[in-house]
Image (cartoon, grey):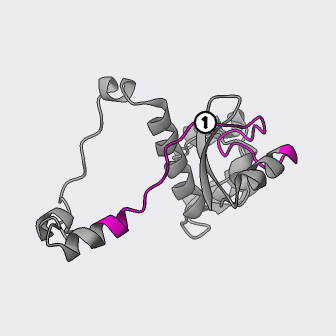
């Protein structure tokens, strides 16, 4: 399996997994490779470092008695009791574009996984839940700017989040 660093014409960077270089070129030529952020099919391969299997190296270190102490590798550390502080505007401004893109994709994946798509019935479903006529659940869907404004004026908490159509398709 080859893991390639790819970039679309809009400069979004993402990863693709292919059986071989020929497999990547074949899929790209047929228009089967597209950016997960914007759907752009103008995809190029970026230079990338080889991926190393560090679990083999860790196993060799343990066999020779040079493994890190258990405290370093422990995943059972207690969870913090308070949520982490929000970043300052200066912190956000210094984040690399690839990190912002990764955070955005993580957030969108979480939202899509944990909401029900009600499509164009969004304003109607949001009102039913708000007024106790329907079960409370996490929903997403479509609303015009006017519908969104009316929901907000009624005291219904909604958040416009425009997403490209590519996010509505199955993800690898």
Location of the C terminus by quadrant is bottom right
Residue 143, position as x, y percentages in the image:
71, 43
Q: Is residue 38 above or below residue 16?
A: above
Residue 118, position as x, y percentages in the image:
71, 59
Q: Residue at x 61, y 34 (%)?
A: 12
Going by the picture, which residue comes out furthest to the bottom? Answer: 63
Does dot 1 land on a helix, a strand or a loop?
loop
Q: Nearer the viewer, residue 62 or 106?
A: 62
Q: Is residue 151 above or below residue 168?
A: above
Q: Residue at x 71, y 51 (%)?
A: 21
Going by the picture, which residue comes out furthest to the right? Answer: 30
Residue marked by disc 1? 46
Q: Is residue 111 above or below residue 60?
A: above
112 on left or right of 62: right
Q: Nearer the viewer, residue 8 or 36?
A: 8
Q: Is residue 127 visible?
A: no
Q: Residue at x 55, y 42 (%)?
A: 159
Residue 145, position as x, y percentages in the image:
69, 34
Location of the N terminus by quadrant is bottom right
94 on left or right of 83: right
Q: What segment is highlighted magenta in the picture?
A: 29-57
């Amino acid at each position: 399996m080859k893991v390639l660093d790819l970039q679309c014409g809009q400069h979004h960077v993402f990863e693709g997994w292919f059986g071989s270089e020929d497999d990547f070129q074949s899929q790209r030529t047929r228009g089967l490779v597209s950016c997960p952020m914007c759907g752009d099919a103008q995809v190029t391969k970026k230079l990338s470092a080889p991926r190393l299997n560090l679990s083999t190296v860790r196993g060799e270190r343990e066999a020779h008695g040079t493994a890190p102490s258990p405290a370093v590798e422990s995943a059972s550390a207690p969870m913090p009791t308070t949520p982490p502080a929000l970043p300052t505007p200066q912190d956000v401004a210094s984040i690399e574009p690839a990190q912002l893109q990764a955070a955005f994709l993580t957030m969108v994946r979480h939202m899509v996984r944990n909401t029900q798509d009600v499509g164009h019935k969004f304003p109607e479903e949001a009102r039913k839940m708000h007024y106790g006529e329907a079960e409370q659940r996490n929903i997403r869907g479509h609303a015009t700017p006017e519908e969104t404004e009316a929901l907000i004026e009624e005291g219904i908490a909604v958040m416009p989040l425009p997403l490209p159509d590519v996010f509505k398709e199955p993800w690898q």
